[in-house]
Image (spheres, grey):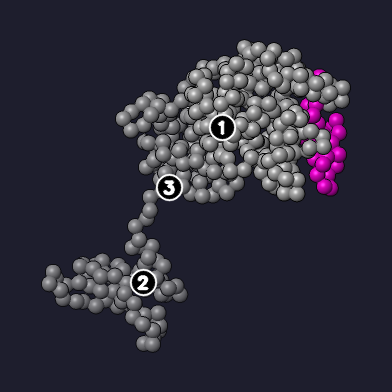
Amino acid sequence: MASVSITRRRTSSGPRYVVRYRLGGRTYPIRHAGSFTRERDAKTRRDFVAGELAAGRDPTRGLRALTETPVRRTLKTEFDKFETSRVDVGPKTLALYRNARDRLRSLASMAPDEVTAAQVQAWIAENSTASEDYAKLSPKSLGHYLSTLRQVLDFCDVMPNPARSPKVKLPGQDKEEVAPPQTNEWQAIKAGLPAKVSLIARFIECEGVRVKEALQLTYGDVDFASKRVRISKARTKGRTAGQRWLPVPDELLDEISDLVPLEDRHRDRLVFPLLTDNQVRDRLYRTCRDAGVAAYSPHDLRHRRCSLWLRMGIDEVQAAAWAGHSKPSMTQDTYGHVMIDPGQDEWRAFWLASYASERSAGVVSVWSQEDEPGSKPATEANSTLQES
């Protein structure tokens, strides 16, 4: 039969009252339930153990809950849990989550359900000014971090979400005009590019692709027969508009073909292996420095091509399809007023010929699954942009 008892022990500091119990008869071992200096506390523990035994439960779990110190739930610890749960995002997004966590500042030690809209606004103000330990964040970076904070509070089931309150405002920002490299600058940069990044930089400048789209391009995406490349959903920003076909000049296709023998071009093999975003950017920056021109990023090369398309007279619908924009107005608003001379562009004749070919076909060349096994052919109905 289960039993519980109090044993009085003499110690150098005075008597102690030890609570012990058995889950059954004498064959069951004696278990320790606590030691107290006051008999009243020992009786309280004895009564608790007796109640658990009477209910047919092992008191171990209940005793553990009584003696363990509860861990305080803070926004910083919830950020870590949120990051672990996001198995659907890439390393770049996870790095953004970690950066946002490191800039929590006054919010870090607060429990998620304690955060108010006023405290979120105070956090924005904290990060909008520089201090000894923290640099000032730009409005764009603050927007990214606020978006992460909103997701974490949603993850914590905080309702209503204070970070989504209309009272929370970000600092205003003046959007600067896109300033891609002019033709003379690009010629100087191209002449000094190291062999390792020369082809990918020229490919980005010619095709107007994002650096991630170029780095993740595989030989399965290159259609040598039709002289085009496919930017699939898996290799763009995850939006339908980013999926597209792009014509490629013979010169670049020949260089891509020479990289790997025909028998080794399996579908998943990267066209530009052993390169990272940072490597391409750093080598381009160094080349700009050595050429004595302003520092341009790989994305500035994309800006250059999108601007040139419009300056050549290519309509915004076709330019948006080639750029992978969701709306033609986005292309026009971003690049419509960029000052750049298309006259000396080495690919001018190629793109004007491709544009004429698209117009004669009557449908903008967007990505489709027509070449995928078991898929239906693409038609005008499944093309997202048509000639206006």
Choose top left, top right, bottom left or bottom right for residue 307.
top right
Q: Seen in the image, is 166 located left or right of residue 67?
A: right
Q: Amino acid under label 1?
A: Pro
Q: Residue at x 41, y 36 (%)?
A: 103
- Point out residue 238 in the picture as x, y percentages from the top left corner: 66, 37
Looking at the rendered image, the quarter that the N terminus falls into is: bottom left
Q: Which residue in the structure is indicated by mark 2? A: 49
**How much space separates mark 1 and mark 3, taking CA atoms?**
45 Å
Tell me if mark 1 has few (under 14), some (14-19) or many (20+) residues whose alpha carbon lies within 10 angstroms of its own: few
Circles 2 and 3 in contact, beta carbons < 8 Å: no
- Point out residue 5 in the picture as x, y percentages from the top left corner: 30, 78
State which region is magenta: 364-388
Q: Residue at x 71, y 31 (%)?
A: 252
Q: Amino acid under label 3?
A: Thr
**Magenta segment includes 369:** yes
Element under label 3?
helix
Looking at the rendered image, the quarter that the C terminus falls into is: top right
Q: Which residue in the structure is indicated by mark 1? A: 194
In this orientation, does residue 20 appear? yes
